[in-house]
Image: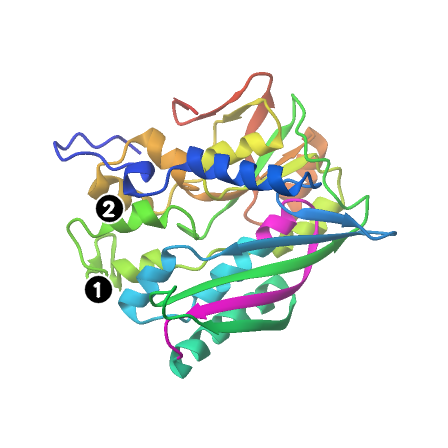
Amino acid sequence: MTEDTDSEEGLTYSQSGVDIDKSEAATAALVGAIGEFEGDYAGLIDIGDRYLALATDGVGTKLLVAEALGDYSTIGIDCIAMNANDLIAAGVTPVAFVDYLAVEEPDDETAEAVGEGLAVGAEQADIELVGGETAVMPDVIRGLDLAGACAGLATEDELFDGEAQPGDLLVGVPSSGIHSNGLTLAREAATRNHEYTDPFPHDESRTVGEVLLEPTRIYRELLGPLHAVETHASAHVTGGGWTNLQRMGEFRYVIDDPFEPQPVFAFIQAEGNVSDEEMHRTFNMGTGFVIALSEDDASRVTEELDDARVIGRVETGNSVSIRGLEL
């Protein structure tokens, strides 16, 4: 990826409407007011012989792309993925999901399409859909909003320690594309010179909107191999991009063999004149999940997972080094 030198002002996530620092500060304030809870990606409750874990998240402004195309068939997958992947990043096995659909006005066709996506996501995550709620709120909602909560279970041994160690290798697993983060920036960049219905320049058999709607990958298949070894920590690469690795502890994460970003990222960067650093602070850039493991365990995991490979290492320090950037 190279920084575009076009004279048009370069976009940033903050200028597009999402300030990650302010968002994290607001979250910290909320958590502080509620009280501390155990877990980084999910809340953990000790129920005796195991932990009950809960995670909640939504689809975000990817919904606006779905609305523009009139295609709500995949956003249910995103909703389940964003929740289930957070549980998986803690070593928790997702077991059940409830959704919350808020609409400006009821529409059977749209609700059916959302439900179809939820069913596909539930199958991919190997979980049960145990209910949900649809709220009609014309004074609050424009269009619709979709969020949900996922419950999971883990024994003490199955939970990841949550802390990487200097000398660990970093095993990466590819993303399926943009997933469901950074869409506020991506949408603004994509629509500077294009409509969502325009052919995607890197693959004219698909539209710009269809590429942005590519569903988030669900990493359910990682749990078996990661439970079979001593997994130190893992990171689901979501909002904040590659800085998410610092959730595994304050170390220097050296990424010297990342997966190639899918063409959607080159498109966003070129159309929005977005800097390399901003791209890596906002998007997954081709890698959706990262695990910190000892050298022996990294070998075992990469042998068992077809598309996983060692992408870097953990050192002392406090940064993420990738593609010539220090984040």
Q: Nearer the viewer, residue 244 or 229?
A: 244
Residue 166 horizontal/vertical position (percent): 65, 21
Q: Quadrant of the C terminus?
A: top left
Q: For residue 93: magenta? A: yes
Amino acid type of disc 1? Thr
Of tags 1 and 2, the one toward the viewer is 2
Seen at 28% across and 68% down, the residue is 69
Provide residue 295's location: percent of width, then percent of height. Answer: 68, 29
Residue underneath mark 1:
197
The relative height of residue 93 versus residue 27 in the rendered view (above or below) is below
Looking at this view, is 286 or 13 the one in front? 13
Q: Is residue 81 left or right of residue 97?
A: left
> For the view shown, which residue lies furthest in the top direction?
317
Instruction: Give the residue pinned by disc 2.
Output: 189
Residue type indicated by callout 2? Ala
Dividing the picture into quadrants, the one containing residue 283 is top left
Q: Residue at x 33, y 48 (%)?
A: 184
User: Which SS class for mark 2?
Assistant: helix
Placement of the N terminus among the 4 image quadrants: top left
Position of residue 235 measured from the top left corner of the image (x, y, whole percent): 58, 39
